[in-house]
Image (cartoon, coloured by chain):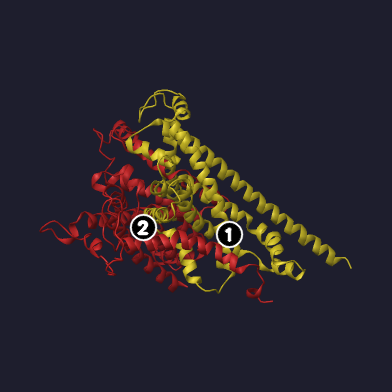
């Protein structure tokens, strides 16, 4: 009886919370296809908001700005996060380690408003001193990379920590040079995590509005900034259409990434099994 | 060969690259921020005055920007300034949001952790999916749902719960719904991580020894998941204090939070020293719970 209650309450609660999580997404998808500007009544199926979306230059331009910023941010973050994770996991002792680990982790708990504000002050200071850089793509990328690096570092760090060091030692015993060990052994081993870090930084950048608001210059607006501008003014089904396209893309990317990871894991397990079998066979034949 | 003595090439390079990056883009900006919070507001084109007067050689360190956070109109107590109220409001919303996330997220994470291992990855992916789709758009969607002529009001009227639409948008309700909605996954993930590691046989043992389910939950499950509760609480509370987007979209003029105040001082009032002093105070406020958390986490180990 007790268990029955728990079971049913459990299912009920899961359904309720998943409902809560998905209702806004469902709502946007449905009303993006609405034929009128109605918020609460579906008056008929139409693609007019998608058409409006494609014709809206500010949104289209913002999309390409965001794409550029997110791509560069993703790559930079993944590289810097790999470096930072490597430093924290492999170099136990060096001058300023505490400061370093503090600086890597701090952006995770720092409100975005403060990151944006302090980077703006840096940009203005540098502009006054050197006449460079103007606020725009570069400054937004710097801000996003700071955040993306911190998140990516966490992902790569945990992968590095659970990695089996004996393969690296084996490679070194067999005469591989340190850089060979890194590129042939370590890098392929943590590649999945680096890709995850890239994706994380990419989506963070593609999603961020606060840092971009502080660091963008005149004429350079990311997609979230454009949407934020529209959103403050009121309801606009064009935004729902944009949201639907975005939800579709993200779902596709994440689900295919999940499938890829699952497949890679299974493949690795099969290979380990095959290797173990081969070893057993070799041992049993005299 | 000892692990630490593995020859890794260019150790200086490997440390130097991220170190330099973080120094330039994190520490330096932060130092500039702190610096400006201690100087006078400038005049004309320059937004602030230098701290050091090259003619007289005198240092001008100004605490005025910090003091003015607490300065009120004649007669009113110090805690009734716009700024102090914005801080209090921010902390209050963050606290309530964290509690709501905990109340919704605890049973949720618990039941995911207790579900069959084969379905767990899918259930977790379903939590993550909305989390990966644009934060801004998900907040925006609530605008349409909560509006006076929106879906929720229409639905409640159709069912007959209410006769007239309730004003939900631009109130505490919409703020808290939006914040809880956005930050729920931050609570669920650490909670799940501790709950899934828990040995549920301990609960059975407790039942065998004659406890009621409630007592068993309170005396066994809750203490064992304390680390997750605290981590989740911090992960929700801290970003909520500085929240900027949700109050702008779902909050009314009476829901002004400190993130917005900093923005207004910076760009509308153009008072850079004030904006930076407010930001530094905000960091100080966040460091307190964070320090407690780290102290606690270190003790656990």
Q: Nearest the camera: B125 or B273?
A: B273
**Contact flag, marks 1 and 2 (Cβ < 8 Å):** no
**Quick check: A126 above or below A45?**
below
Host chain of mark 1: A
Task: Give x and y (percent) for residue B194.
Answer: 48, 62
SS category of the residue bearing label 2: helix
CA distance for labels 1 and 2: 29 Å
Task: Give x and y (percent) for residue B40.
Answer: 26, 60
**Where does the C terminus of chain A fall, quadrant-wise?**
bottom right
**Residue B148 found in image quarter:** top left
Task: Give x and y (percent) for residue A84.
Answer: 55, 62
**Residue positioned most to the front:** B55
The answer, for residue A1, to whether it is visible in the render is no
Q: Nearest the camera: B170 or A103?
A: A103
Which residue, given by chain and number where applicable, does mark 2 sit on?
B237
- Label 2 crowding class (10 Å Cα cut-off): few <14, some 14-19, many 20+? many
Q: Nearest the camera: B284 or A32?
A: B284
**Residue positioned most to the left:** B75
Asked if marks 1 and 2 fall on the same chain, the answer is no
Which residue, given by chain and number where applicable, does mark 1 sit on?
A82
Q: Residue at x 70, y 52 (%)?
A: A267
- Label 1 crowding class (10 Å Cα cut-off): few <14, some 14-19, many 20+? many
**Residue positioned most to the bottom:** B2
Judging by colour alone, the chain drawn in yellow in this rendered image is A
Task: Give x and y (percent) for residue B24.
Answer: 47, 60
Judging by colour alone, the chain drawn in red in this rendered image is B
């Amino acid at each position: 009886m007790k268990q029955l209650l728990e079971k049913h309450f459990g299912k009920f609660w899961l359904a309720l919370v998943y409902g809560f999580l998905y209702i806004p997404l469902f709502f946007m998808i449905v009303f993006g296809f609405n034929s009128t500007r109605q918020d609460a009544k579906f008056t008929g199926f139409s693609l007019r908001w998608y058409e409006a979306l494609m014709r809206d230059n500010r949104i289209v331009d913002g999309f390409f700005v965001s794409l550029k910023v997110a791509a560069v941010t993703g790559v930079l973050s993944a590289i810097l996060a790999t470096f930072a994770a490597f430093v924290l996991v492999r170099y136990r002792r060096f001058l300023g380690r505490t400061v370093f680990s503090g600086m890597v982790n701090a952006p995770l708990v720092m409100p975005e408003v403060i990151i944006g504000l302090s980077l703006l002050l840096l940009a203005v200071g540098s502009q006054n001193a050197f006449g460079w850089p103007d606020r725009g793509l570069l400054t937004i990328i710097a801000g996003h990379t700071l955040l993306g690096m911190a998140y990516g570092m966490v992902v790569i760090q945990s992968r590095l920590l659970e990695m089996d060091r004996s393969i690296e030692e084996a490679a070194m015993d067999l005469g591989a040079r340190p850089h060979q060990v890194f590129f042939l052994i370590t890098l392929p081993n943590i590649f999945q995590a680096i890709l995850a870090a890239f994706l994380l930084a990419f989506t963070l950048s593609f999603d961020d509005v606060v840092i971009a608001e502080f660091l963008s210059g005149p004429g350079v607006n990311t997609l979230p900034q454009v949407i934020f501008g529209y959103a403050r003014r009121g309801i606009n089904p064009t935004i729902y259409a944009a949201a639907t396209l975005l939800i579709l893309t993200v779902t596709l990317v994440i689900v295919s990434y999940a499938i890829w990871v699952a497949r890679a894991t299974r493949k690795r397990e099969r290979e380990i099994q095959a290797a173990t079998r081969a070893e057993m066979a070799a041992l049993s034949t005299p | 060969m000892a692990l630490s003595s593995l020859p890794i090439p260019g150790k200086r390079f490997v440390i130097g690259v991220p170190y330099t990056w973080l120094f330039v883009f994190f520490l330096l900006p932060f130092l500039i921020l702190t610096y400006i919070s201690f100087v006078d507001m400038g005049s004309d084109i320059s937004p602030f005055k230098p701290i050091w007067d090259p003619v007289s050689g005198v240092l001008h360190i100004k605490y005025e920007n910090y003091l003015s956070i607490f300065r009120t109109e004649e007669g009113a107590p110090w805690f009734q300034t716009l700024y102090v109220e914005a801080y209090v409001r921010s902390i209050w919303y963050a606290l309530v949001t964290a509690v709501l996330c905990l109340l919704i997220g605890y049973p949720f994470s618990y039941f995911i952790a207790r579900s069959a291992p084969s379905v767990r990855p899918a259930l977790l992916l379903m939590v993550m999916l909305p989390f990966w789709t644009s934060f801004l758009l998900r907040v925006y969607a609530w605008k349409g749902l909560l509006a006076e002529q929106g879906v929720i009001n229409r639905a409640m009227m159709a069912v007959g719960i209410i006769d007239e639409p309730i004003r939900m948008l631009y109130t505490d309700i919409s703020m808290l719904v939006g914040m809880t909605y956005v930050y729920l996954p931050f609570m669920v993930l650490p909670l799940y991580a501790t709950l899934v590691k828990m040995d549920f046989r301990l609960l059975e043992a407790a039942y065998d020894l004659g406890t009621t389910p409630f007592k068993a939950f309170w005396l066994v499950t809750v203490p064992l998941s304390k680390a997750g509760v605290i981590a989740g609480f911090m992960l929700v509370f801290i970003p909520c204090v500085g929240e900027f987007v949700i109050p702008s979209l779902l909050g009314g003029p009476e829901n002004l939070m400190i993130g917005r105040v900093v923005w207004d001082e910076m760009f509308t009032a153009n008072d850079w020293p004030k904006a930076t002093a407010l930001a530094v105070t905000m960091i100080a406020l966040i460091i307190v719970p964070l320090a407690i958390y780290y102290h606690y986490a270190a003790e656990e180990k």
